[in-house]
Amino acid sequence: MYRKLALFISYLFQPLLIPTLVFLYLIYGATHLVKVSYFDNRFLVAMVFLTTFIIPLLSVVMMRLTKNIGSFHMHSKEERVFPFSMISLFYMITTYLFYLKFRIDPALLLALVVITISVIILTSVTFFWKISAHMTGISGLVAIIFAIALKYPSYDYLALVIGSILAAGLVGSSRLYLNAHTPGEIFGGFILGFSICFSAFYWLL
């Protein structure tokens, strides 16, 4: 039962879903911040979901079918290098296209930029260390919520801050329970995602 719960949490907060969750939060949870919208909000969320989740996921599926990776879990760091590199490329293309083709709010563009930077650094680290992608992703979301809450104290973000921290705790505990990572890899992933996203949103937004 506990294993199934841990797997459910891991799938629910799959790293590729984090950009979509960030956009949902910024568009619908931080409405005072995201003001410029030349496109329908649902269209923007759908485009982020397509380009940062569906397309990269299909590429990973193809890698599995062609046996370039042994499993979707990618247990070793060597197995992660190629798919992570491809995902980095997809994210760079997505960020560039959103910057070039879509006139989106600066907060949304900043989110794509810092997420892409986090993925690139994660991929670089993966050459040497099997750092947790799950924790890098969820800690980035925590950092963005936390940074906005600190910068705009007149808005009540307490529930979101607490909820995101609890979600990060659940994700970290699930990855440890599944023996997917060591505590050091979990902590390293959290520091990576949090430091990059918090710094960008606190100082540049």
Image (tube, helix red, strand yellow):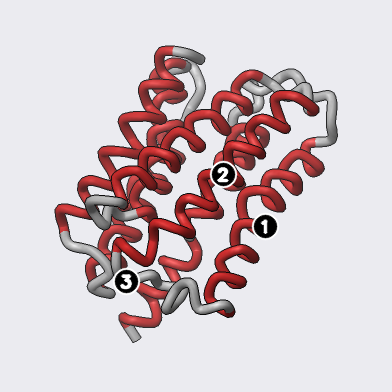
Q: What residue type is labelled 1?
A: Ile
Q: Earlier in the sequence, mark 1 or mark 3?
A: 1
Above or below for 85 versus 78: above
Above or below for 139 versus 50: above
Evaluate whether residue 100 shows in this view. yes
- Verify CB contact (< 8 Å) between mark 1 and mark 3: no
Give the quarter of the image for residue 27: top right
Q: Residue furthest bottom?
A: 1
Above or below for 38 versus 138: above
**Image depth: mark 2 or mark 3 in front:** 2
For label 2, the crowd category at 10 Å Cα-Cα, with few meaning under 14, some 14 to 19 and many 20 or more, is some
In-image side of 158 versus 76 (left or right) = right
- Verify CB contact (< 8 Å) between mark 2 and mark 1: no
Give the quarter of the image for residue 165: top left
Q: Residue 85 placed where, x, y %?
A: 47, 50
Q: Which of marks 2 and 3 is nearer the N terminus?
A: 3
The residue that disc 1 covers is: 55
The residue that disc 3 covers is: 75
Residue depicted at 84% across the width and 24% down the height: 38
- Counting the numbered discs, the total is 3
Q: What residue type is labelled 3?
A: His
The residue that disc 2 covers is: 89
Q: Which amino acid does label 2 sit on?
A: Leu
Q: Residue 8 placed where, x, y %?
A: 45, 73
Q: In which quarter of the image is the N terminus?
A: bottom left
How far apart in space, not on screen, are marks 1 and 3 (Cα)? 22 Å
Q: For the residue labelled by badge 2, is the local secondary structure a helix, a strand or a loop?
A: helix
Pick whichever, 141 or 68, lies toward us.
68
Q: Residue 185 placed where, x, y %?
A: 21, 54
In-image side of 133 versus 46 (left or right) = left
